Image (cartoon, rainbow, N blue to C red):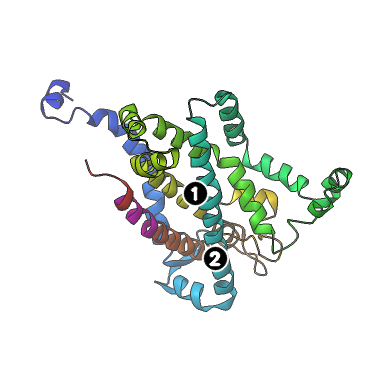
């Protein structure tokens, strides 16, 4: 390959992009396309596959055994996402504003404390929180401080289990939006802030009318990352409850449903159905596209 000719042709970036492009094609794009193809088949590689067209999608929404579980998992995933948007991202921007305040003392310490849970393994934190939320383990300690109202089987109550799992997930990953919001806020030119102070704008006015509009692209990207990650969540439920979304499927998410049907085999059959699992993954892919594309158009500026 003539390096000089490549430079003169205006595509000197191609050799640098090619390794990443090959990696993306073989490990991401091709599995995605193959998953779309697999959703049109039934059976497995060992037992033989049969083309069924859209039958897997039809069964997913019409056969009660599948439809009931899918409706529940989808609704729980939406709730899981909404809790993260309200708790994780709103607190994230609140903490970021505090951490970028020049008068605040000990900012490095607080940044470390907020970001530290992100560095821990999800299975480890999930299991530890599972013990903390178990009244058998934490009950005596809480009662010794007069906190009897906190002694409750939080993960055993279907009314509180999903909320607890969601809040634990927010606690672990809040460091990511905080870090991104801090970087965005620090990137705002001081000229805007000084001009606002000269005009007598209050702190809240500066935030709502100057800072927030300027960091809208970052806020949109954080919303997209939250949306995608929450619709693919699996490990936090696996570590705190189980793959069945206990109790009584109240913490069942699309990720755990996909695992049971497409990989492990769902009770009572117990035989994996890769075609049905691929159908669930395909629907999730299009749901993500419906959420991500409009958000990108609304929040990302045109250069």
| SS at circle 1 | helix
288 sits to left or right of 113: left
Relative to 36, say whether 217 is above or below. Answer: above
Say which residue label 1 marks: 229
Spot occupied by residue 237 in the image (x, y as percentages of width and height): 64, 52
Magenta region: 289-297
Q: For the point 13% across and 30% down, which residue is it?
A: 10
Please indicate whether residue 93 sits to the left or right of residue 142 in the image: left
Quarter placement of the N terminus: top left
Distance from label 2 to label 1 (Cα)?
16 Å
Relative image position of residue 79 (x, y in whole percent): 55, 60
Task: Please give the residue where the numbered disc 2 appears in the rendered image.
Answer: 75
Q: Position of residue 84 (x, y in %)?
A: 54, 51
Reply yes or no: does residue 295 show up in magenta.
yes
Q: Residue at x 77, y 45 (%)?
A: 132
Residue reaching furthest to the top: 4
The relative height of residue 30 versus residue 266 in the rendered view (above or below) is above
Which SS class for mark 2?
Answer: helix
Count residues near mark 1 (Cα–Cα under 10 Å), then give few for <14, some for 14-19, many for 20+.
few
Quarter of the picture holding the C terminus: top left
Judge from the rendering whether residue 137 lies leftward or rightward of residue 296; answer left or right.
right
Query: Quarter-wise, where is residue 53 in the image?
Result: bottom left
Q: Can you give x and y, in whole percent of width and height, for residue 134 in the image?
A: 79, 50
């Amino acid at each position: 390959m003539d390096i000089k000719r490549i430079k003169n042709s205006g595509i000197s970036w191609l050799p640098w992009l090619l390794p990443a492009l090959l990696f993306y094609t073989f490990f991401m794009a091709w599995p995605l396309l193959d998953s779309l193809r697999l959703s049109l088949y039934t059976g497995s590689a060992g037992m033989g596959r049969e083309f069924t067209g859209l039958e897997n999608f039809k069964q997913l929404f019409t056969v009660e055994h599948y439809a009931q579980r899918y409706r529940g998992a989808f609704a729980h995933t939406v709730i899981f996402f909404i809790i993260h948007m309200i708790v994780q991202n709103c607190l994230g921007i609140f903490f970021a504003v505090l951490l970028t305040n020049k008068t605040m003392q000990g900012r490095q310490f607080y940044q470390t404390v907020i970001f530290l849970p992100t560095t821990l393994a999800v299975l480890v934190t999930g299991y530890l929180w599972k013990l903390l939320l178990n009244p058998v383990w934490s009950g005596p300690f809480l009662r010794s401080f007069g906190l009897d109202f906190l002694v409750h089987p939080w993960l055993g109550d279907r009314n509180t289990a999903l909320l607890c799992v969601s809040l634990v997930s927010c606690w672990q990953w809040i460091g990511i939006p905080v870090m991104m919001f801090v970087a965005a806020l620090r990137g705002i030119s001081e000229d805007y802030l000084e001009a606002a102070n000269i005009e007598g704008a209050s702190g809240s006015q500066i935030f709502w009318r100057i800072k927030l509009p300027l960091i809208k692209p970052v806020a949109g990207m954080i919303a997209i990352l939250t949306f995608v990650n929450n619709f693919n969540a699996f490990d936090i439920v696996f570590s705190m409850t189980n793959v069945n979304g206990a109790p009584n499927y109240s913490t069942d998410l699309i990720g755990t449903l996909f695992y049971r049907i497409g990989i492990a085999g769902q009770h009572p059959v117990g035989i994996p159905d890769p075609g049905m699992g691929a159908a669930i993954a395909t629907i999730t892919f299009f749901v993500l596209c419906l959420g991500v594309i409009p958000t990108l158009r609304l929040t990302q500026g045109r250069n």
